[in-house]
Structures are given as structure tokens and as C-alpha cells.
Image (spheres, helix red, strand yellow):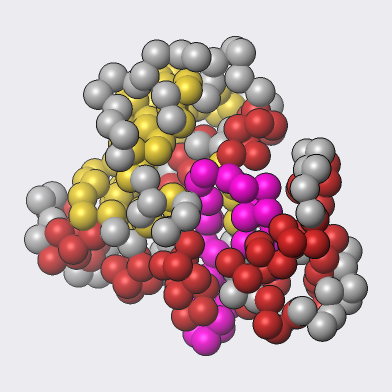
């Protein structure tokens, strides 16, 4: 086990320390240090291109799938350096799940969508109970319990997204990352996902990327505001401010944050 991240507390589940994210020689995100609170919802907000999703995908090593990607700095999950050469990225993604912007159920039955992860991970318990429990946690069970053999792709957009959340929950992660999870949904489905997030934070730590500032102010406990600065090689994202959500939206410390919240740029 690697040493605990410097100054990491029991209340933080993820931590980035002096993190710089590169694609080849291009620096995409610079000098990010941030602690993600356990059993809370943390929102990443900021203009397009500021590195919100790029940083999010560092937390479960999805960026590893991009050949030119590399980092300098550290990313920790519960004391473990996620980029240590001894760490298996597949195991990281099992502990830190991801829900994407567009619902992406597998072309399988509702049941098999939820059961897929546990099956490939060698789950030995009662799979029927796990599927039901996961669907219940995703507030979808009552809507699908009589059609578990039907295709997950036949569900509505909002139901598909909750199915994807149930699929993420089924492998029993510690953290759920959500990249614009409501961007493709109607207002009613968005409200259901927001209510679901508030329920899930009792069991999981959640990080959400959103362009919807109203959503960030409604659902998150903490908010990180990112901005971009131009360079001769392109735009570089950086963390401007990170605080309790109420402070970010009512009394931000930084002028850039204040202007963005007020709609004066971005």
C-alpha cells in the first residue's frame, strides 16, 4: 500500500495533488490540487474546454485509453496512488464507476445490463438480489420489475440513464463519476436524476461535471470552478476556486468565479 497522500483526511475519498494532464506535449490541465469529499456531491463547473471532463476521467483512469495521455503529479483514492505502476486500471474502474452524458445501455435485457459487471467480476452471491437492489437504489425497480427480460434500449432516455446508474452501482463502487448525466434528458427526467443523486450520496461519493449552474447549485455540496487561459499551443484548463457550493454561488472569492456565476463570460 502506498503512503497516504500528504494531508489527506479521512473525509476525502479522492485527491489530486499538483496534477498536470498532458496529451503528448500539450498541457491540457495544469496544477490542479483538490480533495473530493466522502459521501457528498461535488460539481465541476466552468466554460467549455477548461478540463472538467478530462480531470473527471483521471479519477478512474479512463484517459489511459488515449495513447498520448500522461500525467505529472498524483491522484489518490483512499490512500492508494492510482497511477502507481502496481495499480491495475481495471480494478480502479471497478471501485470508481462512470456514468456518461448520453445514456449507453448495452443491447441486452434490463436484467443483463445490471448483471453484466458482477458477472465478469466473478460475483458469487445471489445475482437476482443484487440486480433488484441496484435497480431499487437507482429508483427504477418499480418501473421495470415486470419487464426485466426486455431490452434496456427500449426504455425512455431518463430510464436508460437510471439503468446505467444501476449498472454502475451493481459492481459496488466507492465513487460514482457523472459526466453531464442530464444533458440529454428532459426536465422531468433531470429532476429524477437529481433526486437520485441526493439519495445515492448516503452510500457513495459523487462527482458530477455539469454546464448547468442551476443544477450544480441544487444538488452539490461542494463546487469547483475551472477556467481556461490561452497559450501559444491552445487553451489550458486550471482550477480557479473550490469551496462549499453555497459560497461559490453567493460569495465567491475570485473575480473570474463571480463573473461566470453572473453570466458575464463563458
Q: Is residue 61 left or right of residue 131?
A: left
Whether residue 240 appears in magenta in the rendering, the answer is: no
Whether residue 229 is visible here, answered yes or no, is: no
Q: Nearer the viewer, residue 58 or 146?
A: 146
Say which residue appears at 28% left-offset and 54% top-offset. 222
In this picture, is 83 found above or below 116? above
Q: Position of residue 24 (x, y in %)?
A: 57, 23
The magenta-colored residue range is 161-190
Quarter of the image for residue 65 reads top right
- In the displayed structure, 7 sits above or below 15; it is above
Q: What residue do we see at 46% from left, 31% from top?
A: 77
Q: How many marks?
A: 0
Residue at 50% across, 85% down: 187
Q: Is residue 177 magenta?
A: yes
- 88 left or right of 153? left
Q: What residue is rendered at 70% in x and 83% in y?
A: 143
User: 143 above or below 216?
Assistant: below
The C terminus - image quarter: bottom left
> Residue 263 placed where, x, y %?
25, 69
Residue 158 vertical placement versus 61 (above, below): below
Q: Nearer the viewer, residue 260 or 75?
A: 75
Between 3 and 153, the residue placed more toward the observer is: 3
Picture quadrant where residue 159 is located: bottom right
Residue 195 drawn at (x, y percent)? 45, 75
Residue 138, picture quadrant: bottom right
Residue 42 seen in render: yes
Amino acid at each position: 500500500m502506498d503512503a497516504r497522500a500528504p494531508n489527506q483526511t479521512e473525509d476525502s475519498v479522492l485527491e489530486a495533488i499538483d496534477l498536470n494532464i498532458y496529451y503528448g506535449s500539450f498541457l491540457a490541465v495544469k496544477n490542479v490540487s483538490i480533495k473530493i469529499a466522502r459521501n457528498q456531491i461535488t460539481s465541476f463547473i466552468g466554460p467549455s474546454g477548461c478540463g472538467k471532463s478530462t480531470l473527471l476521467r483521471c479519477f478512474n483512469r479512463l484517459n489511459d485509453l488515449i495513447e498520448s495521455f500522461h500525467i505529472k503529479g498524483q491522484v489518490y483514492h483512499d490512500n492508494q496512488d492510482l497511477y502507481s505502476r502496481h495499480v491495475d486500471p481495471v480494478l480502479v474502474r471497478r471501485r470508481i464507476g462512470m456514468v456518461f452524458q448520453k445514456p449507453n445501455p448495452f443491447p441486452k435485457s434490463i436484467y443483463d445490463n445490471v448483471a453484466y459487471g458482477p458477472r465478469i467480476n466473478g460475483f458469487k452471491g445471489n445475482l437476482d438480489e443484487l440486480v433488484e437492489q441496484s435497480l431499487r437504489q437507482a429508483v427504477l425497480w418499480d418501473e421495470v420489475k415486470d419487464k426485466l427480460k426486455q431490452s434496456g434500449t427500449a426504455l425512455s432516455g431518463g430510464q436508460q440513464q437510471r439503468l446505467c446508474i444501476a449498472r454502475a452501482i451493481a459492481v459496488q463502487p466507492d465513487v460514482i463519476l457523472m459526466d453531464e448525466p442530464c444533458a440529454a434528458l428532459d426536465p422531468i427526467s433531470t429532476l429524477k436524476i437529481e433526486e437520485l443523486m441526493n439519495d445515492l450520496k448516503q452510500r457513495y461519493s459523487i462527482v458530477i461535471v455539469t454546464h448547468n449552474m442551476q443544477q450544480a447549485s441544487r444538488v452539490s455540496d461542494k463546487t469547483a470552478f475551472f477556467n481556461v487561459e490561452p497559450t501559444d499551443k491552445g487553451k489550458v484548463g486550471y482550477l480557479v476556486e473550490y469551496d462549499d457550493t453555497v459560497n461559490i454561488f453567493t460569495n465567491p472569492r475570485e473575480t473570474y468565479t463571480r463573473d461566470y456565476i453572473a453570466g458575464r463570460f463563458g
